[in-house]
Image: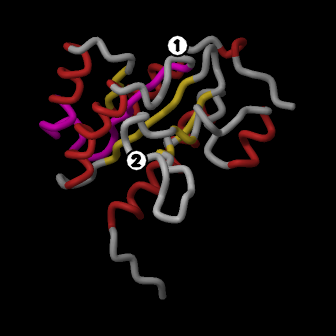
């Protein structure tokens, strides 16, 4: 039996899977894997992978390009980069959004695609850090849409023009 020492990683994997399921249930693809990006002819850079700001360390100690990995990409309209924060308990995931706010402010996600932050889980709507994140990104007029819960995500997905889904190759 495999022992998991990081419950957040397990919870995150489950919630990312549910993200894909919810999108699919609303007739919208949510790309996560290399083969999915390849099927749509979409580069992973700028949609799934994102470089740090220029004044942050760009290379790992072994010389590889550093990258942030988003949780999904919805190929509809101008494209939607999805970052999901799932919280069934209060903890460090909540505090990471302030680092994310800096990434948004410094242009890590670019301006070519929309950016959605989706907060899900039993305690997400009670998390003070998430509420503060929403207030601060609105106040700073950062290019991000905050979505609350699975029902909120479903509501946003229903609003999308399904005729505007990018074509698979």
Instruction: Give above or below for 117 relative to 57.
Output: above
Q: Residue at x 41, y 25 (%)?
A: 107
Q: Residue at x 40, y 40 (%)?
A: 84
Instruction: Give above or below for 14 relative to 36.
Output: below
Q: Tag 1 or tag 2, which sits nearer the N-term? A: 2
Tell me the magenta residue range: 113-131
Pick the front one: 57 or 85: 57
- Image coordinates of residue 146 in percent, x first then y, are 34, 24
Instruction: Give above or below for 137 relative to 129.
Output: above
Q: Is residue 119 magenta?
A: yes
Label 2 packing within 10 angstroms: few (<14), some (14-19), many (20+): few
Callout in the foreground (2, 1)? 2
Q: Which residue appears farthest toward the bottom when viewing the image?
A: 1
Q: Which residue appears farthest toward the right when viewing the image?
A: 169
Side of 104 where 91 appears, left or right: left
- Image coordinates of residue 38 in percent, x first then y, are 78, 41
Q: CA distance from mark 2 to mark 1?
A: 39 Å
Q: Which mark is residue 112?
A: none
Q: Mark 2 and 1 residues: CB-CB less than 8 Å, in contact? A: no
Q: Which residue appears farthest toward the left when viewing the image?
A: 128
The residue labelled by disc 1 is 159
Quarter of the view holding residue 54? top left
* Circle 2: element type: loop
* Circle 1: element type: helix
Pick the front one: 30 or 80: 80
Pick the front one: 81 or 64: 64
Q: Residue at x 38, y 33 (%)?
A: 118
Instruction: Give above or below for 30 relative to 134.
Output: below
- Image coordinates of residue 150 in percent, x first then y, are 40, 35
- Considering the image in quadrants, where does the C terminus appear? top right
Q: Which mark is residue 57?
A: 2
């Amino acid at each position: 039996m495999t022992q998991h020492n990081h419950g957040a990683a397990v919870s995150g994997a489950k919630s990312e899977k549910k993200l894909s399921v919810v999108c699919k249930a609303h007739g919208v693809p949510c790309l996560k894997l290399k083969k999915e990006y390849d099927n749509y002819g979409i580069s992973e850079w700028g949609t799934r992978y994102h470089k740090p700001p220029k004044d942050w360390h760009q290379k790992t100690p072994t010389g590889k390009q550093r990258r942030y990995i988003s949780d999904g990409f919805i190929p509809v309209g101008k494209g939607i980069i999805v970052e999901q924060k799932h919280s069934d308990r209060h903890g460090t995931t909540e505090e990471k959004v302030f680092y994310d706010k800096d990434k948004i402010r410094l242009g890590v996600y670019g301006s070519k695609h929309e950016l959605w932050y989706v907060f899900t889980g039993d305690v997400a709507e009670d998390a003070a850090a998430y509420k503060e994140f929403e207030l601060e990104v609105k106040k700073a007029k950062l290019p991000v849409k905050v979505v609350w819960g699975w029902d909120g995500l479903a509501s946003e997905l229903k609003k999308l023009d399904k005729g505007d889904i990018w074509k698979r190759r």
